[in-house]
Image: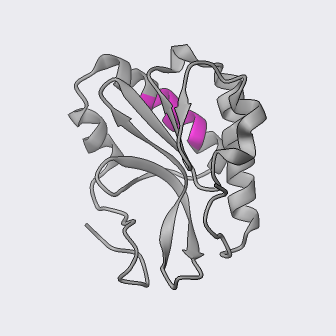
């Protein structure tokens, strides 16, 4: 793995494997189909090619963050992690900002920065697209001054 952080405290790393290789390792047809759809969607929103981050996150574009604690590094602006039976979509500015839109998304659960979806057919894809567009725009507007996601 290639670490792109300027701080040894960062846990986020971009790795050298390709998205194509990672996608070939998926053995669940639903995960593959949903991943292809999310790659197309996030690539259209970001204008960037997908890159692999950490073990299995497919991310688009990057930003630098620095917390008051001194921890800093680089991370994908938008991305997702396909797992068998579940997709994790990352909103680096947090899910709280999107409470109203998430209430209309469909079947999902959330954590501070993640939206968990079993399959894309369970949700309203145009709502997810709007959330991703707004999240991408917000993180880009922070010009390297992103802080912790809202609780």
**Near-viewer residue (63 or 115):** 115
- The N terminus lies in quadrant: bottom left
**Near-viewer residue (79 or 69):** 69
Look at the magenta stretch and give its main secondary structure. Answer: helix
* Residue 128 point in image, percent of width and height: 65, 31
Let me know if residue 117 is in the magenta part. no
| Magenta-highlighted residues | 35-42
* Residue found 66% across the figure and 24% down from its top: 105
Q: Residue furthest top?
A: 121
80 sits to left or right of 95: left
**Quadrant location of residue 65?**
bottom right
Let me know if residue 39 is in the magenta part. yes
* Residue 15 point in image, percent of width and height: 31, 62
* Residue found 45% across the figure and 38% down from its top: 88
91 sits to left or right of 138: left
* Residue 115 point in image, percent of width and height: 54, 37
Depicted 30 relative to depicted 92: above or below? above
- The C terminus lies in quadrant: bottom right
Depicted 128 relative to depicted 11: above or below? above
* Residue 110 point in image, percent of width and height: 55, 37
80 sits to left or right of 13: right
């Amino acid at each position: 793995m290639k670490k792109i952080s300027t701080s040894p405290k960062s846990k986020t790393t971009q790795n050298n494997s390709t998205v194509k290789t990672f996608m070939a390792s998926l053995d669940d047809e639903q995960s593959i189909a949903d991943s292809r759809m999310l790659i197309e969607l996030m690539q259209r929103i970001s204008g960037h090619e997908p890159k692999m981050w950490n073990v299995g996150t497919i991310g688009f574009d990057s930003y630098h963050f620095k917390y008051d604690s001194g921890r800093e590094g680089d991370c994908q602006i938008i991305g997702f992690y396909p797992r068998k039976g579940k997709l994790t979509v990352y909103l680096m500015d947090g899910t709280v900002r999107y409470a109203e839109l998430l209430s209309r998304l469909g079947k999902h659960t959330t954590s501070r920065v993640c939206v968990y979806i079993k399959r894309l057919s369970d949700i309203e894809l145009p709502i997810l697209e709007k959330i991703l567009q707004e999240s991408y725009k917000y993180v880009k507007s922070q010009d390297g001054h992103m802080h912790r996601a809202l609780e």
